[in-house]
Amino acid sequence: MKKSISCCVLIAICLFMGNVLWAMDNDVKDIPACKYCGMNREMFAHSRMLTAYDTGSKEGTCSLHCAAIDMALSLDKTPTSIQVGDYVTKKLIDAEKATWVIGGNKPGVMTKNAKWAFADKSDAEKFQQANGGRLATFDEALQASYQDLGNDIKMIREKRKMRNMKMNMEHKH
């Protein structure tokens, strides 16, 4: 009897984990690249976002930076769900319930001022102790994204300019 209960529990755990992995893979398979910057969302699973709108549409982005751009361009739509990759597990979590860390010494995705989401506040606190930054809510992280936008776009343009110059130099040789 104990063996069959243990077996059922094991099967239930495997099915649950399979569904979690399927959901993670599915959002990346459905939307493999960020439409704003072209970055691979699977490579940036720890920062990717998935926003569902009241129109039934969904937008997958690589980061809060690109999700903020999408939300600004979609003012005529209301988000019904905003999910973000948990920094530790890479699973999608509710962005509005996550504990965010803004800043610190870890380079951000599409930004100089990093913004990372954590399902567990204790994970955010450990990350903060190791890397700096400050704990924040989603609304604070989103506000910081909008405040950082000008400097971030300048940084991205400069990086692309340098990359293009390097590619042009390599083609000349």
Image (cartoon, helix red, strand yellow):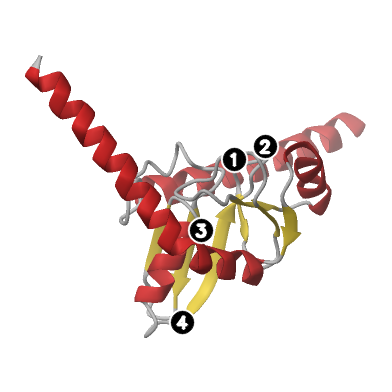
Assess disc 4: are there few (<14), some (14-19) or many (≥20) residues with their C-alpha within 10 Å of its C-alpha: few
Give the total number of marks visible in the rendering.
Answer: 4
Q: Which mark is residue 78?
A: 4
Mark 1 and mark 4: Cα distance apart in space: 31 Å
Residue sitting at 57 percent across and 52 percent down? 113
Assess disc 2: are there few (<14), some (14-19) or many (≥20) residues with their C-alpha within 10 Å of its C-alpha: few
170 sits to left or right of 63: left
Rendering coords of residue 163 (x, y %): 26, 33
Assess disc 1: are there few (<14), some (14-19) or many (≥20) residues with their C-alpha within 10 Å of its C-alpha: few
Q: Which residue is mark 3?
A: 64
Q: Which residue is mark 2?
A: 14
Residue sitting at 64 percent across and 44 percent down? 87
Label 1 with label 3: CB-CB less than 8 Å = no
Rendering coords of residue 13 (x, y %): 72, 40
Residue sitting at 80 percent across and 53 percent down? 121
Which of the marked residues, 2 or 3, is nearer the chain's N terminus?
Answer: 2
Which of the marked residues, 4 or 3, is nearer the chain's N terminus?
Answer: 3
Q: Where 80 falls versus 64 (above or below)? A: below
- SS at mark 4 in the image: loop
Q: Amino acid at mark 2?
A: Cys
- SS at mark 2 in the image: helix
Residue sitting at 67 percent across and 37 percent down? 14
Mark 2 and mark 4: Cα distance apart in space: 35 Å
